[in-house]
Amino acid sequence: MKRKREELPSTGDSVHKPPPGTRSFTTGKAVKQALALGNRQSFVSFHQQILTASSLLPLPIAHSTIVILQHYLDASPTLDEIFECWSYADKSRNDKLLESAVALLIHIIVLLAPLPFFRPSLVGIVRKIQDDKAGYHIMLNKLVQSGKREQVLLGLHLAATVVQFDRPDPAAASHGASGRLAIRMWGVLVEGGSVKGLGKLMGMRRRGRDGVADYGDKDPLDKPDVRHALLQIILPLLSSPAFQVHARQILPGLYSNLSTDPPITVLRVLNAVWMAVTAPTPGVARRISLTLLDERALESLLGLLAREDIETSTGRAVGDIVGAFLQGVTCSPGRGLCFQDEGWYLRDSGAAENTSPHERERRGLHNRILANVIKKVGAKVADETRLGEWAINLFQACPELLAGYWAHSALSLEPRLAARWIATMSYIGRIISLPPPPHSTFRQPVPRGANISAEDMPPRSEPPSVATMIEAILPAPFTKAHITKGLSHPDLLVQHMTAVTLARGLQKLGVVQDALLRIERELEAEPGPSSNVWARRRRELEMEARKRVPEVLVIIGFAQRSATIARTLPDTDDEPDPAVLARSQMLTESALRLFGLYHQNLPSIANEARFDVGKLLVSASSARAERRERREAREGSVISDSGSVGSIGTVGTAGMGGGFGHARGEVHGFEALAQVH
């Protein structure tokens, strides 16, 4: 049986006490002499003596570990003993000696890299690894391609150590102004053919006996596995053109395996991607964003929104970290994959006339990647809070996506008393309540280089299409049948949710109509018939909205039922339950608000309706008030119990027509109702 690996020794201010059977060195000369012998035990002993977890770095320059390394560098500035042993072990195929030599070389660079004092010495060592004449770059590629887990890990770890030593600046990496040693190391892997297999190595982890990778509370970089060593290579190079040529074959494995990474790794990956897509100039950043982020990457990140495990350095859940990242790269126009659109207008895609409308719409989108991603999310937006928040923020940033989304949303709006239906209605209501695109999008785009405000540009020759606008106001899944059924549902909560969502749509309709009317009136002040198209589009929008809302009689029935919920027995003066009365009042107010919105924003359907106003003036307290007044009249008093004078004739008494001198009868329009309320 294999022996269990011993825990890493703790670091202190004194030289580590090596494990039994190993040697401790006190001078650099002793280290050089021992390593020159090519004895594997000497390499293991010195490695154990200086072993330090990466989470404890950097060590102070006066630390005993740094002091012994400084003495060794004084005796051997280019670590010739280690390189010669590596070369000898490679030729003699002594795997154990080779692994010990490379592991010691890696750890020396890791310990000294954070200290500027040793940078000149380390630059010489790194260049020796990359030197074409020395041949060590060939041996490094040989390790990566060996197929042996330990040697693959050592080869990647050595390359990662060099990259981390000279990390490129994301703001300058596009023109090679920094990180030349790191980029050269990437070139070594490319020229040696190792890059071709890096995508498959992305999923290689150090797993337990049960086959599950469990990193616990430890930093995975303290003892990196193949995946984390590879991440240390590619994350600093994300903004480098040299890496981006090979990004397509490497990055899918990076994103798809994030679901099993520890929280600290998720944070490091997202930080690196964020710096790569935001640090360069806008034009370069856009190209980098399209290279590093695609549909599969976003889908993998959306799958992390449900993770609740905490990242200790920030104290935030993984889902919150991923949500903030997605907010930045998908919901901020001009950054990441979120490109500035034109509101409800598609861009001119140059599609041929015989192209199908669906294809023209697809080509006309400014954010096709985001459109494809949001269509695949499905009904989970109503179940997962973070996912729903992201979708709403996305639609606010990119209004053009909403029209093509509903057909793929898979949302069920059949009215029923269920938590999922309520969450779905709330989600749709929030989308409906999003403000329309800025008014500047209804005007012609500002020419490049022109010093003109967008508000000073003339209106566009064509208003947005009705199909696009109506989907942002009264979405197709929120059908007339669903609204009618919801308003007449036996459960009051279902009625309330339906009424509130419908009211939101009617309010949004009014806002959009006002925006169109503003352009229409602006054009009326100018000569020519150009305003007709905006007026016609406003009328077309109203007609389309009429098709998606129930008839006025449905609202009348809803109002009547709402007003009589708290009604008690006809021959008693008992007060109703306060909770029931509150529900009745709330639903009655909702019904009256719907009437007002119909009258304001759908005047055509309102004027065509014929209804009995008296039915609308029934309240839960009307019958009780009438009975009280009749009783007081019989007793010879016109003063009520509360001390107020009773009205002669009531407003909307039960079984009567309207009050205020109106006889019961058919009334045309909303005028009588407006006079009462």
Image (cartoon, rainbow, N blue to C red):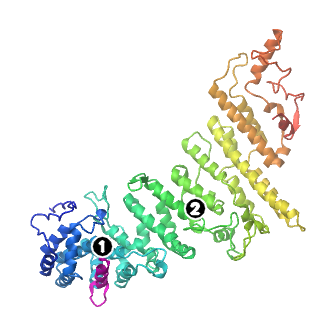
Spatial separation of the CA atoms under disc 2 and disc 1: 36 Å
Amino acid type assigned to the residue bearing label 2 in the image: Cys
Compare marks 2 and 1 and give the one earlier in the sequence: 1
Q: Nearer the viewer, residue 59 or 356?
A: 59
- Where residue 368 appears, as percent x and y from the top left, is 59, 68
User: Which of the 4 image quarters holds residue 95?
Assistant: bottom left
Report the residue marked by disc 1. Answer: 157
Q: Main secondary structure of the magenta part?
A: helix
Residue type for callout 1? His
The x and y percentages for residue 152 are: 28, 74
The quadrant of the image that shows the C terminus is top right
- Residue at position x 54%, y 58% in the image: 377
| Tally of numbered tags | 2
Can residue 148 be seen by looking at this rendering? no
Q: Quadrant of the N terminus?
A: bottom left
431 and 82: which one is in front? 82
What span is colored magenta in the figure?
114-136
Q: Residue at x 82, y 44 (%)?
A: 606
Give the residue at mark 2. 331
